[in-house]
Amino acid sequence: MSDSNAPPPSLYASREPIFPKRVSGSFRNLKWIIMIVTLGIYYITPWLRWDRGPQLPDQAVLIDLANRRFFFFWIEIWPHEFYFVAGLLIMAGLGLFLFTSALGRVWCGYACPQTVWTDLFILVERWIEGDRNARLRLHRQKKMDFRKMRLRATKWVAWFLIGLATGGAWVFYFADAPTLLVDLVTGQAHPAAYITMLILTLTTFFFGGFAREQICIYACPWPRIQAAMMDEETLTVGYREWRGEPRGKHRKAEGAENLGDCIDCMACVNVCPMGIDIRDGQQMECITCALCIDACDDVMAKIGKPRGLIDYLAFSDEPRERAGHDPRPVWKHIFRPRTIMYTTLWGLVGIGLVFALFIRPEIEMTVAPVRNPTFVTLSDGSIRNTYDVRLLNKHGEDRPFRITLTGDPTLRIQLEGTPYETVDVPANATYLQKVYVIAPTSSGPAAAERTEFRFWVEDLTNGDRAHNDTFFNGKAN
Ligand code: SF4
Ligand code: SF4
């Protein structure tokens, strides 16, 4: 008889810490290179200088929130040009689709910040506490003696310093890095800089040091989405079960001649940062970091078997391989309609952005008619309309801009505050100029309800022009 008062079984499973073993091989080397390049770009970029002239910041990459500008080497993006950022995000998305459909979760395995920083944290942990077995022993040691305390404290301090450098590097993207560094050290920086640094330091420390694979498994939506981008042609890390099974350690035992190539050494499991056994088949936890390939290739070399028991495989090749044939060449899996379509779209968006970058004007103008009142009758009977004209000078120096109009020849222009048609627009700024348009008393525009015309602005330094269409309100309104 069952006990109806018994508490229901717990659905909670506590986390088993993972202590990946050191591994060497070509995929591990590739991951080291990617780690050095990506971390190098992240930490060094804010310190690169780029001369833009005396009135502009000389930081190569700068998100200038105060002046609402984004500087990227020679490119300067203004708020109304946000479509460039949108275009880059679309390209990043298409690039992710392309790589996922061709090579599975390569982004997760090699370049995702969570993977890169976790890899760095594990490297530091290994330097301080030793390889897998030493770390396991330390973890299982219940007594907190001096040695354990020293190792733990050293590791946490090192992790914290990495977190601090990471948070620090982030805020340097938003202000002049050398100036901000001095301000941060002397306590004169804006509180927002300290708060941002603190949050990023602590999240890096926690995500890279403690949460690690839990972020990939439980917090990241990507493993759930990627399935839609993969198909049976996608190359992803898998186990040649038809070659490895039945697995067995005891090669000299009776019946060992019937065993497959897997010697059940667990090397592939021990190096896995996600703590899974790839021999159980494709799993959502697998980030395709390929470290198990390196580990198994090493084992295969030692026992004199061909490499590739664990390898980048496509499901579509499985029947061929089971029948004893070689898999199809890699390029056949990579170049297929789906990946070609993603590449084409990616290229088109990229070409569009480059084109837009080169044809964008260096001066711009917006016109807002003042409609309260719609028009004013002057003492001589002429009709006057008022317009707020905003002039944008994207150059690094002040420039003289001339404002004119075309349309009905009787319309006359007058700038507020100056008898001339020219105004000096400061460098890298928007300048608001009130402009009057006047129609003589007996002219057509003075009597008509509305007369369309065009405002022109001309940069007198280089002759660049921009225009804006609007209309004149006459007495018929
Ligand atoms: S199973 Fe292999 S490829 Fe997948 S996460 Fe583990 S080590 Fe990386
Ligand atoms: S490393 Fe290779 S041989 Fe060892 S258990 Fe894994 S698959 Fe089998």
Image: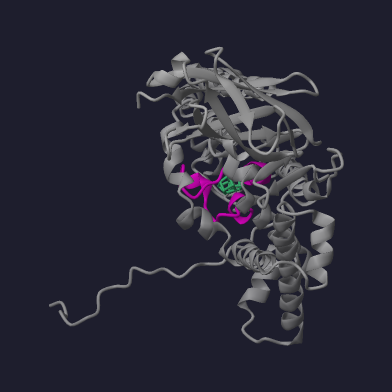
Quadrant the C terminus occupies:
top left
Q: Is residue 430 left or right of residue 102?
A: right
Judging from the image, the colouring scheme is one colour
* Quadrant (top left, top right, bottom left, bottom right) of the N terminus: bottom left
Residue 37 location (% of width, % of height): 77, 43
**Image quadrant in which you'd find residue 168:** bottom right
Q: Residue at x 54, y 48 (%)?
A: 248
In the image, is residue 276 part of the stretch drawn in magenta? yes
Q: Is residue 464 left or right of residue 384?
A: right
The answer to whether residue 431 is above or below residue 18 is above
| Residue 2, x across and y down, in percent | 15, 77
Horizontal side of 420 relative to 252 (left or right) equals: right
Residue that lies at the very extreme toward the front in this rendered image = 380
Whether 328 is drawn above or below 238: the answer is: above
Is residue 262 something one can see in this rendering?
Answer: no
Q: Which residues are magenta?
A: 268-295
* Residue at 58% in and 53% down: 269
**In this image, 351 relative to 464: left or right?**
left
| Residue 7 visible (yes or no) | yes
Location of residue 333 with respect to 198 vertically, above or below: above
Give x and y (percent) for residue 340: 54, 18
* Residue 394, above or below 298: above
**Which of 186/261 is in front?**
186
Does the magenta portion include 130? no
Q: Residue at x 43, y 38 (%)?
A: 373
Task: Using the image as rendered, state which of residue 135 and residue 299 is in the foreground.
Answer: 135
**Nearer-the-camera pick, 395 or 70:** 395
Estimate the x, y position of residue 225 in percent, counting from the top left.
43, 41
> In which image quadrant can residue 91 be found?
top right
Q: Main secondary structure of the magenta part?
A: loop
